[in-house]
């Protein structure tokens, strides 16, 4: 059937998809839900190189028995929509970034515990479903998914979100229910004091001490380039490895508070570090929330809607 | 309380007939919740009759107006993709009937939060509604969340609201805080509604 464009073999009890499929040059949609796929050889070898590999746009393998994302899939450079909902996945391979054309990724209802930052390298991803898994944290890199319009995270094990999530300016849907999100302000006081190297690095950066690559050993030049800015806008400091994790609320219109993880350069940083201002704790809390609030205003309509 | 001598039991053979009977029932001054629920349940879902209203959206569930009931009620079809769900909401003092046309929907009932609400909302009960079942809720019964918990099948439901309303409150499960929202139609009478403003939504 060389002209076949859509094939639905859902609910047929298949344990493997045969190599005959590889020769279908016009097949763009393959639905194989609710079968017994998942063992080795479920998908035909050489999928990426075959005519099918170039034509396939939509692949639905939900309701099967995959314990890992089948490596054979990774060759599907043109794939736009992939569903592996309701399988037995325990993780997502970093190689998922090879599915360069992916716009829709449904991984709900698995046993996924963590998300590889490489997922953020999918430039066209607009719909990401990770609900009903065992995810404990979201990598901040996920904020690089500029095209993301809908993110489904409900029914996981999240206690907080990275503050970078506020950078997802096109996000219209965000589901968070059924996560043990921290409601009250929590401060993580386990703080490793900075090393001398860290302190020196901070001084160089904050005092703008000039240096040229020829002045320093290569490893130190690289080290200095990895400085992160303290999100406290009153601080203007930097940190390298030594930081305080702090969960802060970003208050959306006073009605809804998302616990976001902030990295600060020191435990004192929730209050302004510079000598310029003096303020009470409650004001400093709202000051350091300002930066977050500005970004949050973009997401302000992300309310119970 | 006086029992009526004879309770009408209606059987709707088609969606068109269901709508016709609903118009007749709602033309009266008093409408019986049990009668409407039984009528809705009696209609055996036939996709040929409602497919043209069932417009799905990739990102979230859709509301598709079927009939505006001479102003007495709104009849609409909701389409739920895999994993799509609603927030916890009330029904603005109206009756709400929800019949499953295809697939399954989980309904979780919640108590109204305390006035000074600052704690997790209390779940009253939950159930999975099957094809052709019809549920009923109003504000005196409580609040609910409706979701398609299937990761493989979509769901379609038929809703009747009387009197019609276009705004309601949604509630944050973790705190009980409420927020008023306007509701819009994805399509009306089978035609896609354009110029719908995009709204950012967080479900909790």
Image (tube, rainbow, N blue to C red):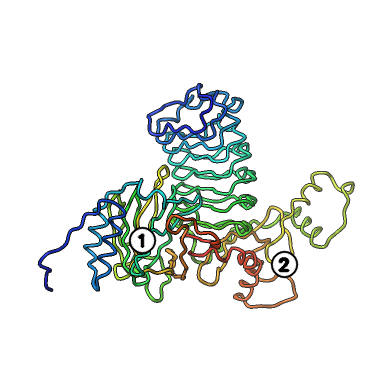
Judging from the image, mark 2 belongs to the subunit labelled A
Q: Give residue B2's position: percent from left, percent from top.
A: 11, 73
Nearest the viewer among A44 and A274 is A44
Please identify the residue farthest to the left as the structure is shown.
Answer: B5
Q: Is residue A127 left or right of residue A36?
A: right
Q: Give residue A255's position: percent from left, percent from top.
A: 50, 70
| Callouts 2 and 1 in the same chain | no
Question: Mark on residue A146?
Answer: none
Q: Give residue B79's position: percent from left, percent from top.
A: 42, 52
Q: Decide if residue B17 is in sight here.
A: yes
In this view, A174 is above or below A291:
above
In this view, A210 is above or below B3:
above
In this view, B71 is above or below A145:
below
Look at the numbered disc 1 and give the secondary structure of its residue.
strand
Mark 1: few, some, or many residues within 10 Å (few <14, many ≥20)?
A: many
Q: Is residue B184 left or right of residue A243?
A: left
Which label sits in the foreground, 2 or 1?
1
Q: Decide if residue A259 is in sight here.
A: no
Query: Disc 1 designates what residue?
Result: B75
Judging from the image, mark 1 belongs to the subunit labelled B
Nearest the viewer among B119 and A215 is B119
Mark 2: few, some, or many residues within 10 Å (few <14, many ≥20)?
A: many
Q: Is residue A92 left or right of residue A294?
A: left
Q: Quadrant of residue A290?
A: bottom right
Look at the numbered disc 2 and give the secondary structure of its residue.
loop
Q: Is residue A93 left or right of residue B56?
A: right
Count every numbered label the image shows and give the total: 2
Q: Give residue A75's position: percent from left, percent from top.
A: 60, 31
Question: Mark on residue A235?
Answer: 2
Mark 2 vs mark 1, CA separation in Å: 57 Å
């Amino acid at each position: 059937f060389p002209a076949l464009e859509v094939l639905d073999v859902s609910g047929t009890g298949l344990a493997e998809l045969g190599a005959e499929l590889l020769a279908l040059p016009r097949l763009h949609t393959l639905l194989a839900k609710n079968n017994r796929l998942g063992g080795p050889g479920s998908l035909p070898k050489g999928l990426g190189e075959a005519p099918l590999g170039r034509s396939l746009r939509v692949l639905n393998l939900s309701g099967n028995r995959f314990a890992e994302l089948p490596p054979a899939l990774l060759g599907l450079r043109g794939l736009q929509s992939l569903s592996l909902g309701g399988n037995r996945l325990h993780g997502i391979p970093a190689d998922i970034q090879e599915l360069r054309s992916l716009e829709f990724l449904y991984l709900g209802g698995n046993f996924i515990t963590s998300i590889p930052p490489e997922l953020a390298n999918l430039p066209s991803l607009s719909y990401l479903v990770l609900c009903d898994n065992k995810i404990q944290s979201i990598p901040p890199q996920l904020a690089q998914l500029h095209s993301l319009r809908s993110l489904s995270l409900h029914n996981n094990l999240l206690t907080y979100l990275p503050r970078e999530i506020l950078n997802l300016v096109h996000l219209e849907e965000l589901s968070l229910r059924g996560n043990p999100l921290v409601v009250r302000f929590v401060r993580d006081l386990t703080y490793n004091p900075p090393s001398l190297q860290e302190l020196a690095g901070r001084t160089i950066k904050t005092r703008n001490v000039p240096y040229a690559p020829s002045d320093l050993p290569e490893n130190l030049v690289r080290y200095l380039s990895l400085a992160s800015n303290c999100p406290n806008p009153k601080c203007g400091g930097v940190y390298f490895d030594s930081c305080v994790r702090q969960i802060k609320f970003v208050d959306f219109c006073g009605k809804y508070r998302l616990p976001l993880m902030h990295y600060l350069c020191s435990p004192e940083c929730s209050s302004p570090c510079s000598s310029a201002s003096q303020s009470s704790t409650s004001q400093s809390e709202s000051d350091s929330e300002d930066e977050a609030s500005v970004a949050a205003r973009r997401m302000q309509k992300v309310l119970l809607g | 309380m006086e029992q009526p001598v004879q309770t009408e039991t209606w059987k709707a053979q088609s969606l068109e007939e269901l709508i016709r009977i609903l118009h007749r029932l709602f033309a009266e001054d008093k409408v019986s919740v049990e009668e409407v629920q039984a009528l809705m349940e009696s209609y055996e879902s036939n996709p040929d009759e409602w497919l043209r209203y069932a417009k799905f959206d990739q990102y979230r569930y859709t509301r598709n107006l079927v009939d505006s009931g001479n102003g007495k009620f709104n009849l609409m079809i909701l389409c739920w993709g895999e994993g799509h769900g609603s927030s916890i909401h009330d029904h603005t003092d109206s009756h709400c009937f929800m019949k499953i046309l295809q697939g399954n929907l989980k309904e979780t009932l919640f108590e109204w939060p305390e006035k000074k609400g600052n704690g997790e909302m209390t779940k009253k009960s939950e159930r999975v509604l099957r094809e052709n079942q019809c549920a009923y809720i109003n504000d005196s019964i409580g609040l609910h969340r409706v979701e398609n918990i299937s990761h493989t099948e979509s769901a379609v439901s038929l809703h009747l609201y009387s009197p019609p309303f276009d705004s309601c409150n949604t509630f944050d499960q973790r705190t009980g805080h409420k927020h008023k929202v306007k509701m819009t139609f994805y399509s009306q009478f089978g035609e896609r509604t354009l110029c719908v403003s995009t709204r950012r939504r967080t479900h909790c």
